[in-house]
Image: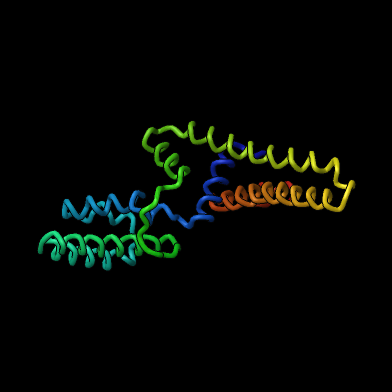
Amino acid sequence: MNITRTHIISMFASMVLAANAFGHCDTMNGPVVPLAQAALEKGDITPLLKWVQPDYEHEIKEAFNRAMAVRKNGKDAQELADRYFLETFVRVHRVGEGAPYTGLKDEPVLPIVVLADKALETGSVDSMVSKITDHVARGIRDKFDRARELEKHKDDTVEAGRAYVAAYVDYVHYVEGIRNAVMAAGHAHGNSEQHADPHNR
């Protein structure tokens, strides 16, 4: 299989999403919460509706209207109303993604997500492509080199053999993970594994 840079980007994105279940959307510094805060300040929910599936639009509008009414009753009321709406909005947004909601989190956004957002802002994906491909290539080479070195002594002792097997499994699983993520990304773009996997040729 010829793994192109597009495959690598798709693969890495798939790995991140699978591992973190769109986790950046429930952080205070993610793409969703600041937009919701701005909508509350402006009193306009329209920019938020694109983040919500149609089935949940009515629920979000009701929550927004309640929050806008309550936040007029002083600073404490505003803080409570804002928190209520943010919790509701992020929960409903994540339901639309098929992801669980475990509350708002005050934690940094994953570096890969920062890179992805930056690429959209600048209109260029080159920097992200370079960083991701370098990272993946380094991971493969490091695991390969370790397995290859330990292979030389795999039959010296049982302990040496076990060390080799552990390194071999780590190396192969890493490569398999890349392959599986690439295939999953291919399916997401309407590609058939029949045409992408050399084992099916």
Residue 195 seen anywhere in this rendered image of the structure: no
Left or right of 187 in this view: 49: left
How many marks do you count on the picture? 0
Residue drawn at x 30%, y 65% as measured from the top left: 88
Residue 99's quadrant in the figure? bottom left
Residue 178 seen anywhere in this rendered image of the structure: yes
Residue drawn at x 35%, y 64% as measured from the top left: 92
Residue 155: x and y, percent? 89, 47
State the residue in front, 72 or 176. 72
Left or right of 124 in this view: 171: right
Residue 136's quadrant in the figure? top right
Residue 7: x and y, percent? 59, 42
State the residue in front, 198 or 109. 109
Work out which quarter of the rendered image holds the N terminus and state it.
top right
Residue drawn at x 64%, y 51% as measured from the top left: 177
Left or right of 37 in this view: 21: right
Q: Is residue 73 above or below residue 122?
A: below
Q: Which residue lies furthest to the left in this view?
A: 73
Residue 5: x and y, percent? 58, 36
Residue 4: x and y, percent? 61, 37
Colouring convention used in this rendered image of the protein: rainbow
Residue drawn at x 74%, y 38% as measured from the top left: 145
Q: Is residue 20 above or below residue 132?
A: below
Left or right of 8 in this view: 122: left
